[in-house]
């Protein structure tokens, strides 16, 4: 299921464990694939065939490119929820939308908090940071956040990236 209710750090750890298991499974599948395919054929199979698996269910086949994209967005979401549990423990449980669900990526069950989350090479890719700030600013939530994971950006609040009133921007780090 792509929607999770997370109330504590143990549930965040369970999410990260599922992501890690799927990553290990994908590496095993890649080893098998590249042992019989080379060059373009190997890359073709990674993009168009189920060489990988769903980041939340290692038994569900998925192409590797999708797995990579989803894996790091889900990992960023797990780190964001961990941060929200520290900032707003009384607003838990948090609903984490890990698929393409309407609404915010993370919401408090009481409706007071909304957050968008992404993982990218840099925050300006596809204007993702700007679009997520604008999206979350339109919610009726009292607490509004954008969390991101980008290489080279350390964890913590990124006040220099805040433009919309009331929207906090946080990096969850650019490392595992």
Image (spheres, rainbow, N blue to C red):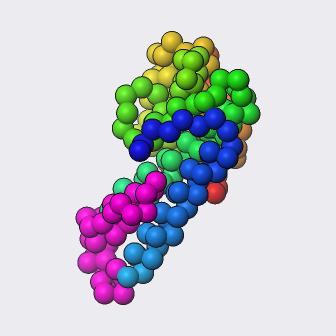
Outermost residue toward the right in this view: 86
- The residue sitting at 63% across, 35% down in the picture is 7
Residue 45 visible in rendering? yes
On the image, the x and y values in percent for residue 77 come to 55, 42
- The residue sitting at 42% across, 43% down in the picture is 2
Q: In which quarter of the image is residue 157?
A: top right
In the image, is residue 150 above or below residue 164? below
On the image, the x and y values in percent for residue 117 come to 52, 37
**Is-magenta flag for residue 25?**
no
Residue 164 visible in rendering? no
155 with respect to 116 (left or right): right
**Is-magenta flag for residue 41?**
yes
On the image, the x and y values in percent for residue 137 come to 51, 18
Q: Quadrant of residue 176?
A: bottom right
In the image, is residue 5 above or below residue 54? above
The residue stretch that appears in magenta = 33-62
On the image, the x and y values in percent for residue 72 come to 51, 52
- The residue sitting at 60% across, 30% down in the picture is 93
Q: How many labels does the image show?
A: 0
Q: Which of 128 and 31 is in front in this view?
A: 31
Q: Which of 90 and 135 is in front in this view?
A: 90
């Amino acid at each position: 299921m792509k929607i999770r209710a997370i109330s504590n750090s143990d549930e965040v750890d369970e999410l990260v464990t599922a992501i890690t298991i799927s990553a290990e499974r994908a590496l095993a599948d890649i080893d098998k694939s590249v042992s019989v395919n080379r060059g373009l054929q190997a890359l073709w199979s990674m993009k168009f065939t189920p060489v990988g698996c769903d980041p939340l269910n290692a038994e569900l086949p998925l192409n590797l490119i999708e797995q990579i994209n989803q894996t790091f967005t889900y990992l960023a979401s797990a780190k964001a929820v961990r941060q929200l549990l520290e900032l707003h423990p009384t607003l838990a449980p948090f609903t984490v939308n890990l698929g393409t669900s309407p609404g915010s990526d993370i919401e408090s069950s009481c409706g007071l908090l909304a957050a968008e989350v992404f993982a990218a090479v840099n925050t300006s890719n596809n204007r993702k940071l700007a679009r997520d700030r604008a999206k979350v600013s339109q919610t009726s939530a009292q607490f509004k956040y954008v969390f991101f994971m980008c290489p080279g950006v350390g964890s913590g609040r990124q006040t220099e990236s805040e433009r919309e009133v009331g929207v906090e921007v946080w990096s969850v780090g650019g490392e595992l």
